[in-house]
Image (tube, grey):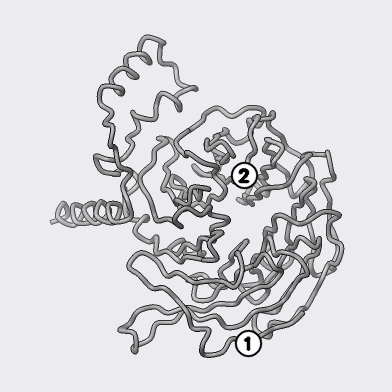
Amino acid sequence: MRSNKAGEDDDDLDDDEESITITTEENPMDVSFRDSSGTAFAVGLITGGVEMWRRTTTTTTGGKKRVKKQSTIQAHSESVRALSHMRNGDVLATGSGDCSVMLIDSTTEQAIGRFAEAHEEAITRLTVLDDANIIATGCDEGVIKIWDVREERCAHSFKKDEIFVDFVSEMYHETTSERNALVATSGDGTLACLDLNAMKVLGQSDNMEDELLSCCVVKNGTKVVAGSQGGNLNIWNYGDWIDSNDRFPGHPSSVDAMVKVSEDIVLTGSSDGLIRVITVFPNKMLGLVGEHGEYPIERMRLTADLNTLASASHDHTVKIWDVSFLHEEDAKGDGGEDAMDADNNREDSDMDESDSEDERKKQKQKKKKGKGKNRRLPGRGDLHTNAAKKKAAKFFDGL
């Protein structure tokens, strides 16, 4: 494993009002923040390298945040498809197309552990389950393995065909006082929930006849949302795994990445290059965080404080976004007149309600009359403005 320190000429960034844009040597495959505020982060590359970056605020640039590449580590012989920090950021775990897992000391940038043949096929996802010792990996043939890094061994393997028959596209760790589960999606069109205490499959959905590519658990553990190749968001009641009970269309392209901002809001990264703000129940598109032009978004990651978003795209860039404005009280409920309000989406998302057929027809007719041909999805500025209005209204109401 080689580690090349970056020189002064590597301080290359594009700092604008919406985001900080960094240019990577090759296409980024995944990104992980080392600390809760996003000061330091790592980027996995398609070439097998890992770039270490750091954000700083300097007086020479008028207080603006700058980003500098610290070094490049040649960790794997093939692409670094997944990586994640653990042990409070002191260790970086990476999963590669060369079927291996590596543990890297974040300070010394030296390898401190390696599982050379972790899977028989390329690793697609890696998720930290226990900040100190336990990780999960998924691969191209649908196998999910649970690892205890202290003992450098596989604690359990959900074998090929036991759950999935195609690549593992996403894994989401859901943990509460009563629950320790891993929700995973696959290119075979199914979603599964694994009990990590009993190491058994709790349930699996029927084939959705569309690749499922991303997922997360929202609404205080009661709903599971999964993005698909066709652009739909499929929604399950947690525990009712056979079939989804709701479907929210609206993405013209595949939903490749998804992160949870709150129990009501998720951000989706699509192959059309847009990062959208979505609320769940009511299912609604509030607007956009930003975009990567015409290039698809490969992965997204939020900091632990949920205020900073990183998005990686095929245009050799990673963008760092300030999304703290999404936490303004009730911002999720005010997308402006140009937003897709809840009624405009109800024709596709009310499958589980008891409205009569006549009432649904009347709703559709009203919506068709009210729809404009040039409706605009609110952008980042609109969302900021709406959040500010809400904050100001709350202040004056208290006087």
Q: Quadrant of residue 239?
A: top right
Amino acid of disc 1? Lys
Q: Residue at x 45, y 76 (%)?
A: 13
Query: Does residue 375 appear to the left or right of 302 in the view shown?
Result: left
Does residue 226 sit above or below 133 in this rendering?
above
Q: Position of residue 105 (x, y in %)?
A: 70, 79
What SS does tag 2 mark? Answer: strand
Q: Residue furthest top?
A: 358
Around disc 1, counting alpha carbons within 10 Å, would you say few (fewer than 14), some (14 to 19), or many (20 or more)? some
What SS does tag 1 mark? Answer: strand
**Which callout, 2 or 1, points at the residue further toward the start of the chain?**
1
Q: Residue at x 40, y 35 (%)?
A: 282
Q: Residue at x 32, y 14 (%)?
A: 362
Amino acid of disc 2? Leu
Query: Does residue 274 appear to the left or right of 207 in the view shown?
Result: left
Q: Position of residue 216 (x, y in %)?
A: 57, 46
Does residue 173 sit above or below 11 in this rendering?
above
Number of numbered discs visible in the structure rendering: 2
Give the labeled residue for mark 2.
Answer: 213
Give the labeled residue for mark 1.
Answer: 5
